[in-house]
Every structure is written in C-alpha cells, then in structure tokens.
Image (tube, rainbow, N blue to C red):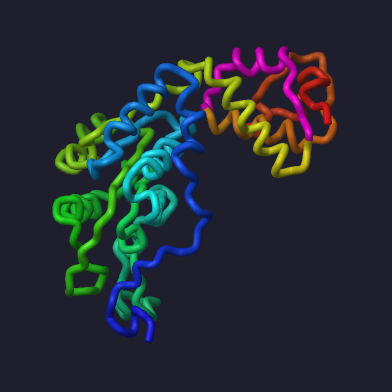
Amino acid sequence: MNADQAGVPDRRPPKTVPERQLTDYRPLLDGSPAMRAIRTVIDNIADTDATVLIRGESGVGKDLVARALHAASARREGPFVKVNCAAIPPGLLESELFGHEKGAFTGAHRRKPGQFEYAHQGTIYLDEIAELPLALQAKLLHVLQDFRFSRVGGHGSIDVDTHVIAATNRDLEHAMARGEFREDLYYRLNVVEIRIPPLRERREEIPLLASSFLSRFNAQYGRQKRLSPETMARLTEHSWSGNVRELENVIRRMVVLRTVKRRSRPWSPAIGTGRAQPLDPPNSAARA
C-alpha cells in the first residue's frame, strides 16, 4: 500500500541531482567584498529557520545564494525544492504549491502532494515571488504563520516543517504601493533580506566566475579551451546587463564553438544572448 492509498502524505521529493556541499559554493561567494558580506550573512543565519528574501536583478546569482543557504543549514541533508512562481499558470499554482485531493477539479484523478510537502524537513525556494496572485499570497501568509495548510479540495490540515526562501527581481515596495503585493506577506518574508548587486558593480569577480564556468564547460563538452589575458580583460570591461547568467552563456558559447572567426568589428559578449553571431576574441580564447 502506498502513501496515497493509506491517506498518509507522501513527502518523498522527486529524484533530483544531489545537492552540493557548502564548500562548493564558497569560492563563488568570495570574489568581492559584496559577496563576502553575503557569505557572512549566510554563516550567521545557518543555524536558524529565519525566512529569507533574496533580491537582485535577473541573473545576479539568487539561485546560488539560495542553494548556499540550504547547504549551510542543518537541513542540508533534506530536499531543496525550487518553485518558479512565474513559470506556472496562475490557475495551477495553488495545486503546485499545496497539492490537491482526488476529484478536487476536472482532471484530478488522484491525490497529488504539493511542493511544500516535498520540501518537508528541507528548504523550499520560491523564486519570482512577486508573480504570486493576490489570492494565493493570502494563503501563503497563513502557511508561513503556522506551517499548516490544506490541499486543494481537502478538509484536513497538513503540518509541514520547512525553511522558506523567496526571491524576486521586482521592486516589492512599488508593488505594494500599487496593491499588487500584500504588505503583511512582505514583512513575513523579509525577516532577513539579502541584496545581490549586479555584476557590473562587482567586476573583480568576473575572472573567477569566467574561469569557473570555463572549467565546468570544458569538462562537460570534452574541450580544452583557454581564455587569453586580452579576452579576460574584455570580459571584465563588459557591462553585463544579463549579469552572471549572461557571462555563463558567453563562456558556454566560447567552449562549444570549435572554430571562432575573427572580425574587424569589436568583440562583444552579446553572442551569449543570441544577438550577435560568432565570437571574435583573440585566437587563444578559442584554442583547443
């Protein structure tokens, strides 16, 4: 008899890649004074379940910080469950977060645990929290108050033990002023706030990040590419509107391209966004 048949919540998370240890994240949190300050915050709250709100532009590394928080905590052996609130249709989000009972709606042919149940004794990471519909914000607020909820279509209460981390790239204060985000939920989430500066404000990290991405993608694709000093200097000078994600995509593109054409136009990392065609750094940047 499985957990659903017995009426017992099945809190086993879906199979995922094992979480890395905190030591795997430390090098990426040590490249600038700003990130070292964030690492200090992580160390200070590692033994607590204080709700954390991570803020910053798209691509700055909010996922990295969330995973480092989990890896530093006493819950590191438990599941890390990420929910992208912007990627799930509003009509399905409540069921995704809190689960549903059989027959709760058309197509609900069996009981389905939600992501909060899968995160039991671990961490749930609510990315793009500002995209949560107002009605669902109210339910989340109650869950954060007593960590108890009901599945969609259910009547019994389910207790859950999880650490909540939320993230957003939006101005929540502006969203509150416009009535798009609940003020009480904001204060419930914002027990500890971590603001991650954009990459253009921490350029000293770029060589470390670029080297880390290069090593990873060389291993992944069986390449032996290298970055010349000139290319590294140009990477460091670039404005990186897409932040760390854009840099990662550029390095991946450098690695997967077996040949790189030289052009007369200035080199631009914009190839990582698909806005430009083949890369034209010095030959040593694409040397196999």
Q: Quadrant of the N terminus?
A: bottom left
* x and y, in percent, of residue 61 in the image: 46, 33
Name the residue at the bottom extreme.
1
* x and y, in percent, of residue 221 in the image: 74, 43
Q: Nearer the viewer, residue 251 or 174?
A: 251
Taking the spot 19% from the left edge, 43% from the top edge, the residue there is 185
* x and y, in percent, of residue 20 in the image: 49, 45
* x and y, in percent, of residue 47 in the image: 27, 41
Occupied quadrant, residue 131: top left
Q: Left of 221 or right of it: where is 86? A: left
Q: Quadrant of the C terminus?
A: top right
Occupied quadrant, residue 252: top right
Occupied quadrant, residue 262: top right
73 to 272, vertically: above or below: below
**How many numbered badges does the structure rendering display?**
0
12 to 60, vertically: above or below: below
Taking the spot 21% from the left edge, 67% from the top edge, the residue there is 158
Q: Nearer the viewer, residue 150 or 33?
A: 33
Q: Is residue 267 magenta?
A: no
Query: Which stretch is magenta?
Result: 224-243
Taking the spot 72% from the left edge, 12% from the top edge, the residue there is 230
Taking the spot 23% from the left edge, 36% from the top edge, the residue there is 190
